[in-house]
Amino acid sequence: MSWGCVQASVALREECGFPACHTMFFGGYEDDDDDISETSSQKDELEDNLEDVAAELDLGEPSDELKDFARRNLGELPDTRLNLVQELRNVIYERGEVVPHRTDDSFLIRFLRARRFDVEKAHRLMNNYYSFKENNQELHEDVHPMNMRFIGDAEVLSVLPYREQTGRRIMIYKLGNWNPSSYSIEELFKATVVVLELAVLEQRAQILGGICIFDLGGISMQHAWQITPSIARRTVELMVTSFPIRTHAIHIVNESWVFDIIFAIFKPFLDDRMKEKIYFHGQDFESLHSHIDPKFLPKRYGGMRPEYRYTDWIHNFLNNETIIAEMEQLGYKFDLGEVKKMLDDVELEISSDSNVIMTSETSSLSSNSSSVNNNA
């Protein structure tokens, strides 16, 4: 990239209110000065074996440490928690502005956590969540997640099968791997929604939020031409105002002058609060390491971890009846014959060259897939 392009890039970001290597933010309007420290057990476990990870969602109750974090930073107090859940439920029924497909405690609390237990804001978020579904039905209806493997095969979107030092998940987009002539940006939206719906099943993610890395190496004008104002607006709606999970930070790496063309389209949709949590690093991975310990990053970003494939996650998801049931409630489709075939394929891939550990929950392919078939 030429020096003139570098100067133009910096100038554009400073014009929009960004420090030269600082931030824009997608995901929640709340102040996110909170943080959670790396525990000594995390450090010891990592030092023992960097590669001992398991691609599986934590569907259990939050730990005492997470509950304390939620109390201090989200206002989730034991004495008022259930009362606020009931208050939100009452507001939903009384106003009738939205008809959610669920009103149980575990579902409503997602929206309260995303808005720090402010009932009015949580109700507005729920309205936005269902409005987005209604206005973008093609992203949700009759979507077969297993038919979207091509996005994982191309390594366009992935979620690391371990958490960084504060306990947050990391989602990575490698947009330079996306071939717009092969499939549209709509498919990327569909995949993103699927990942978010899976992520919010973890109470840890509801409490801590997540981290996103956008690796823009290899993006070209062919990619920039796909980004229209309507696409930019829909992106902000999905990741800022319409989903019950907070994004703790977004990190941009390997960006070039092409990104600034794309960013200019997003500019009208950003406010000051959105600008506080995107960090521009370029090829300076030491800058990235000031936010994410390299012990929790792939080697391509100057980290210590090997590369992991999305198929490691598929193995766990398709073996978990709770996850399948949650996704089917949202309208996602699973062909059980295809599920069984894919489980067999993924088992072969994992056993051949994956770094991910097979847990007891995820190792019983035939028995679990049979159970899914019997209970469908």
Image: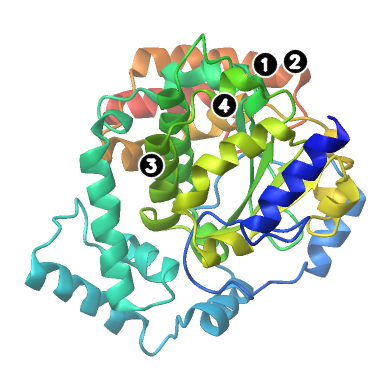
List the residue tagged with mark 4: 224
Closer to the N terminus: mark 1 or mark 3? 3
**Residue 194 in the image: x percent, y percent?**
43, 36
Closer to the N terminus: mark 1 or mark 4? 4
Q: Is residue 358 visible?
A: no
Question: Can you tell which mark lies on residue 250?
Answer: none
> Residue sitting at 84 percent across and 39 percent down?
301
Circle 1 residues within 10 Å: few <14, some 14–19, many ≥20: some
Q: Quadrant of the C terminus?
A: top left
Q: CA distance from mark 1 to mark 3?
A: 36 Å
List the residue tagged with mark 3: 234
**Residue 317 in the image: x percent, y percent?**
49, 34
Q: CA distance from mark 4 to mark 2?
A: 38 Å
Compare residues 207 and 361 and report the one nearer the observer. 207
Where is residue 115, by image quadrant? bottom left
Q: Quadrant of the N terminus?
A: top right
Which residue type does callout 4 highlight?
A: Ala
> Mark 1 falls on what kind of element?
helix
List the residue tagged with mark 1: 349
> Mark 4 falls on what kind of element?
helix
**Residue 258 in the image: x percent, y percent?**
67, 30
